[in-house]
Image: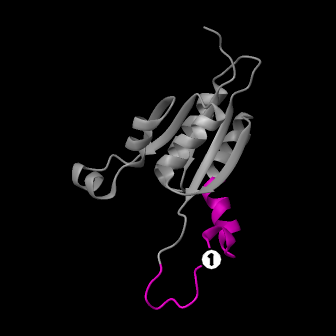
Amino acid sequence: MLNLRKKILVAIDGSPYSDKAAEEAVRMAAGNRSQFKSKVFALLVVPNAQSSSYSDFVPVKPLTETEQWDELRKRIFYIVEKSAAEYDVPLEMIVEAGEPAEKLVEFARQEGVDVIVIGSSGKGFLERRLKGSVSRRVAELAPCSVYLVRA
């Protein structure tokens, strides 16, 4: 088997689970010793719109247009940036709006990703049924391998 460059997509959301997945994705890319470096895509999916309450008279700005966005973005991507720099792994950071599982699968298809690395919280049956599981949906719909990382 040829050991060519791989495209690795990691789901980022700022949680300890996604930080662990980011570290694992970078290690996976760094482990490729061929002349072709693997690349890591770190994808953060933010909700389309924040929910409004009855007391809101002015529409809420999208998260990416707020004054706090730059600081928040730096914190969310900190671990993956640090790990990629440490291992000299090419990194592309992407922010998209929408439903996380759908956006991850869509991005994987468009970019021809070889593996999706995603953190899994290991929620119980009831919590999974009430809230849903992004990692489960990605594993079911992905056009490539999915690597679940438990924190």
Q: Is residue 39 above or below residue 61?
A: above
Q: Residue at x 53, y 55 (%)?
A: 13
**Which residue is under mark 1?**
61
Q: Is residue 56 above or below residue 12?
A: below
Quadrant in which the C terminus appears: top left
| Mark 1 crowd level (few <14, some 14–19, many ≥20, 10 Å Cα) | few
User: What's drawn in magenta, residue-wise?
Assistant: 52-77
Q: Quadrant of residue 26?
A: top right
Residue 5 at x, y percent in the picture = 69, 23
Q: Residue at x 65, y 10 (%)?
A: 2
Relative placement, left or right, of 95 versus 140 is: right
Q: Amino acid at mark 1?
A: Lys
Q: Can residue 122 be seen here?
A: yes
Q: Is residue 52 above or below residue 37?
A: below
Is 20 magenta? The answer is no
In this view, the residue in front, 43 or 87, is 43
Residue 57 at x, y percent in the picture = 54, 91
